[in-house]
Image: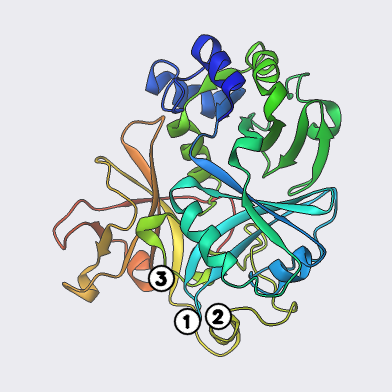
Amino acid sequence: MTTELNASLATHGPVTDGSSSGSAIDELVAARDGIVVAALSDMGLIRASGDDAADFLHNLLTNDIKGITADGARFAGLCTAKGRLLALFLIWREGDDFLLMLPRDILPAILKKLSMYVLRSKVKLSDATDERALIGYSIPVAVSPAPTLGGAAAALVRFGGVAIEGGQAIRLDDTRWLLALDAATAGSRWQQLVAEARPVGLAAWQWLEIRAGQPRVVAATQEAFVPQMLNMELPAVAGVSFSKGCYPGQEIVARTQYLGKIKRRTYRAALSVAVVPGTHVYAPDTGDQHCGEIVSMAPSPAGGFECLVCVQIGAMEGGEVRVGAVDGEQLAFLPLPYEIA
């Protein structure tokens, strides 16, 4: 997070770690019902530059990276040879470069992992976290965007991007945008935004992410999921291409899609006590063998907590999935904004 933005946050927004800007429940209600902005201090950026950057990323990740245009973005994963996800990225272009957004807790290890593949490729990878301030912006569908966002940004289709004052805007879904702002002007831009939108902390933004059914991979869940377990091949998530060619783990991902049956999916659920990502879940049919695990977790404006949970389809359909132990709290499943085939 930039120095200028830190100074603005101290006066106009959440504390500098992004945790809160006041009452947690008030923030959650504001995120559900109104226009909010959040400093995404838990996310970082990797920059890929050089003549071979597009080919390099295209050959490593689950989506069609060469197809990303100057006015678009894509979601993609990095897998092991066994098809297990090490990271999920939101990726967009900045001139001839690519920016890859991912959680900060795994960025150093992923940057090192990607660098191992460079070899003779004409590509340079660097940590670009300090070059851009990442801000989340959300509005309910029935509410008009704040004028500061700009009409072009408001009119974007999902995963569309456009240049705005001080940076770039990318539409994430019906209610959320990502603003990637120049470090030098981020503080003044933040002040413009909070004149029209309520600043909230990371918990409120993460609840919005869960409500949208958007998965993330953190250190505790690396190598836990193949892409289909996180609904990544569905159009609403759109993180896998089956026509782009090979990448690490591609054979496993393709076999799961075309030859095997997808046995686990990610669902949204409510519970009364917070647990951490990676916590196992259980069902009567599987006994003391876990049938899935928590993907992400955030407090809910309705009280308690909400999560994304990857679980065996049969266990979810059976209606009794418990967290942490066979006699743990039972999850209450909630709707997602998209259908799971």
What's the residue at 71%, 75% (across, down)? 120
Q: Residue at the far front: name it.
A: 120
Res 1 → quadrant: top right
Q: Which residue is mark 2?
A: 249
Front one among 94 and 172: 94
Is residue 318 in sight in this rendering? Answer: yes
What's the residue at 83%, 35% (across, down)? 163
Mark 3, mark 1: which one is toward the viewer?
A: 1
Q: In the structure shown, which secondary structural element does the residue marked by tag 3 occupy?
A: helix
**CA neighbours of label 1 inside 10 A, class few (<14), some (14 to 19), many (20+):** some
Q: In the structure shown, which secondary structural element does the residue marked by tag 2 occupy?
A: loop
Is residue 156 in sight in this rendering? Answer: no
Q: Which residue is mark 1?
A: 82
Give the CA separation, mark 3 to mark 1: 22 Å
Res 128 → quadrant: top right
Residue 267 in percent (x, y) is at 44, 57
Contact, mark 3 vs mark 1 (Cβ under 8 Å): no
Residue 65: which numbered mark, if any? none
Residue 113 in percent (x, y) is at 52, 66
**CA neighbours of label 3 inside 10 A, class few (<14), some (14 to 19), many (20+):** some
Residue 93 in percent (x, y) is at 78, 51
Identify residue type, mark 3. Answer: Ile
Q: Which residue is mark 3?
A: 313
Identify residue type, mark 1. Answer: Lys
Q: Earlier in the sequence, mark 2 or mark 3?
A: 2
What's the residue at 50%, 52% (across, down)? 107
Q: Is residue 127 above or below residue 316?
A: above
